[in-house]
Amino acid sequence: MLEIQEKFDISGYGEIKDRAGIKNLHVTEALNGEEVTGFIAYAYDSDRTFVYDYDDGGDIMLCDGLVRSVMFKSVLKGIETLEFALDDSEKYKNLIKLKFLAENENICGNLNSFMNGCENCKNNKGGDADCQ
């Protein structure tokens, strides 16, 4: 069964930490049993969360789950902005497909409304036409 869990020991992710030039890197992993099938690396700032890298193994639904997990944790901390600072420009494609980002943008704002928008879709009997 797939689980998404924060990894409190970031061993194995030092390269991302060094590349981002930060000390407070957080990593959340997708686990299938003990096998890591994906991750997302991020850090909190006072007014936004920065995402520095992710790996979804080519699974767009896993990408969705990883990003939403960071969004949720950010909202719990009172942070309303998610900024993607990815080195690999190809990784933006799934974020745009999932409507986390607009074309040529790297910031997803108003996270609380974004998360609540999904609740509206679930209750919308006519489909997801009102989703962002």
Image (tube, rainbow, N blue to C red):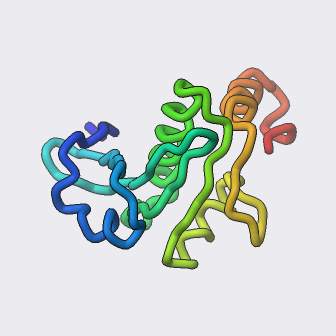
On the picture, is 98 further left or further right than 2?
A: right
- Residue at 53%, 32% in the rendered image: 72
- Residue at 66%, 32% in the rendered image: 115
State the quadrant of the C terminus. top right
Residue 91 position, x and y percent, is 53, 71
On the picture, is 14 further left or further right than 23?
A: left
- Position of residue 55 relative to residue 47, above or below, is below
Residue 37 position, x and y percent, is 28, 56
- Position of residue 55 relative to residue 42, above or below, is below
Farthest left residue in view: 34
- Residue at 79%, 38% in the rendered image: 128
- Residue at 50%, 51% in the rendered image: 61
* Quadrant housing residue 28: top left
Residue 79 position, x and y percent, is 61, 34
Between residue 49 and residue 100, name the one nearer to us. 49
- Position of residue 91 relative to residue 117, above or below, is below
Residue 117 position, x and y percent, is 75, 31
